[in-house]
Image (tube, rainbow, N blue to C red):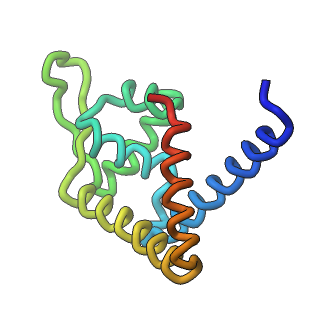
Amino acid sequence: MPEKGQERLATELGTTVSLLMRHLRAASPHGELTPTQRAVISRIATDGSATIAALARAELVRPQSMRLTVGALEERGVLARSPHPTDGRQVVFSLTEEGRRILTVVRQAKHNWLAQAIADRLTPEEQRTLETATELIRRLMPQ
């Protein structure tokens, strides 16, 4: 059972990480993309082509909701559909060149914002402390 200090730290860390994520999303020049759309683009870029069902499971949403998300991305030319390689009843979605371009621009904008904030707002000693804290946060992640 965690002690009160650990519970307080967990609350503060969760709140701070949430705020950081909001600022990173706001730094993106493609602010018209929803968080789910960004997650889908990123997942397909990392894991490869996927069906609506697989994306819905991965993002913990209903297939109907994912169908809307994927449809909007397909309409914008970010995703393209193709036949499933082994199941003719399904289709898979993959990133288009436009999708790759958007993902690169979004990631670079987030990285630039965060790197600039670190440079502008933290002393060299604080930057070293942040480096240590980043490794500790990484260790909190499931393996």
Residue placed most toward the observer, 21 or 82 = 21
Q: Examine the rendered structure and indicate whether residue 136 appears above or below residue 31.
A: above
Which residue: 48% across, 34% down?
A: 59
Looking at the image, the residue that sits furthest to the bottom is: 120
Split into 4 quadrants, where in the image is the N terminus?
top right
In the displayed structure image, the side of residue 22 where residue 7 appears, left or right: right
Q: Quadrant of residue 53?
A: top left
Looking at the image, the residue that sits furthest to the front is: 125
Q: Quadrant of residue 4?
A: top right
Residue placed most toward the observer, 19 or 99 = 19
Q: How many numbered marks are there?
A: 0
Which residue: 51% across, 66% down?
A: 128
Q: Position of residue 86 (x, y in %)?
A: 15, 17
Q: Examine the rendered structure and indicate whether residue 104 appears above or below residue 52.
A: below
In the displayed structure image, the side of residue 109 where residue 79 appears, left or right: left
Which residue: 35% across, 48% down?
A: 41
Looking at the image, the residue that sits furthest to the right is: 4
Q: Position of residue 26 (x, y in %)?
A: 54, 68
Which residue: 56% across, 63% down?
A: 129
Split into 4 quadrants, where in the image is the C terminus?
top left
Looking at the image, the residue that sits furthest to the left is: 85
Q: Position of residue 71 (x, y in %)?
A: 38, 44
Q: Position of residue 54 (x, y in %)?
A: 37, 26
Q: Examine the rendered structure and indicate whether residue 107 appears above or below residue 49.
A: below
In the displayed structure image, the side of residue 46 where residue 129 appears, left or right: right
Residue placed most toward the observer, 110 or 93 = 110
